Amino acid sequence: MRREGYEFEVGRPEVIYIHEDGIKKEPIEELYISVPQNYQGLITTELAKRNATMTNMQIDGDNVNFEYEILTRNLIGLRSSLLTTTKGNLTLNNYLKGYVEYSHQPDLYRKGVLISCNSGISIGYAMNTVQERGELFIKPAMNVYEGMIVGINKYDEDMIVNVTKGRKQSGVRVKHDEITQTALKAPIQLTIDYAITFLAKDELLEVTPQNLRLRKKILTETERRISDRKARFEKNNN
């Protein structure tokens, strides 16, 4: 579709639940991982975060073979995360084992995002300040719009930022390196796999022939606040 010039939006993958005898059930999978022994601790730490249960572990030469049971919803994004952590030194396979009764678990932890507060062209001068608050997805001279996600916040909450703000003109002479882009860090490279697993429930991935962009489903800050208040009100009255 991208080759033919189409543009579309996708949301975070959702697990398909079933109901049997009035009981809500969710899929659980068997997970098999083979990894060099020096990454053993990283694997066990990451799987513990996702509430996976280890059923077997064997040492085979320089490798360690793990067997886990893990809920499908906790499996989303695991492959790309482990490939990054182990620098690609990983073999991973998973198979559907069956369905178990649904259990309430907290969502997997993810930091907040940096959201553009207006539309325009990103400017290196503004990005130099914004990057102190987290990591960016964008480069200078890119088109951005209100509600577009331009980076990852270093804190838990979302933050509104302005990456289109230019330096005010004045008669005061400044050093050249204070207004250039030489201090900008390399942005995070967005891929479809990474972006889909990064998304929160209120976010979308825009796929176009030229670009991948992340955005909030509700673009304006005012409308997002109204929506959040309505959601909290409905939750408290149910």
Image: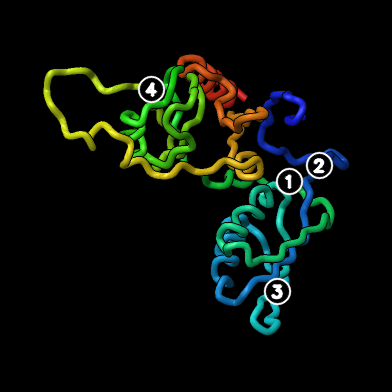
Q: Earlier in the sequence, mark 3 or mark 4?
A: 3
What residue would you read off at disc 1? 102
Q: Which amino acid does label 1 sit on?
A: Tyr
User: Measuring 72% from the left and 74% from the top, which residue is drawn there?
Assistant: 56
The outermost residue toward the bottom is 61
What residue would you read off at disc 2? 23
State whether residue 218 is above or below residue 48: above
The alpha-carbon separation of the residues under discs 3 and 1 comes to 28 Å
The local crowd at label 2, few if under 14, some if 14 to 19, many if 20 or more residues have their Cα within 10 Å, is: few
User: Measuring 57% from the left and 47% from the top, which residue is drawn there?
Assistant: 108
The alpha-carbon separation of the residues under discs 1 and 2 comes to 8 Å
Instruction: Indicate which label's residue lies in the foreground, 3 or 4.
Output: 4
Q: Earlier in the sequence, mark 1 or mark 2?
A: 2
Instruction: Indicate which label's residue lies in the foreground, 3 or 2.
Output: 3
Q: Earlier in the sequence, mark 3 or mark 2?
A: 2
Q: What residue type is labelled 4?
A: Thr
Instruction: Classify residue 178 by image quadrant.
Output: top left
What residue would you read off at disc 4? 164
User: Measuring 57% from the left and 23% from the top, which residue is drawn there?
Assistant: 231
The alpha-carbon separation of the residues under discs 4 and 2 comes to 51 Å
- Closest to the observer, 143 or 72: 143
x and y, in percent, of residue 173 in the image: 13, 26
Q: Which amino acid does label 3 sit on?
A: Asn
Instruction: Indicate which label's residue lies in the foreground, 3 or 1.
Output: 3
The local crowd at label 1, few if under 14, some if 14 to 19, many if 20 or more residues have their Cα within 10 Å, is: some
Q: In this view, does 44 lie to the left or right of 225?
A: right
Instruction: Indicate which label's residue lies in the foreground, 1 or 2.
Output: 1
Instruction: Indicate which label's residue lies in the foreground, 4 or 2.
Output: 4
SS under mark 3: strand
- Closest to the observer, 154 or 131: 131
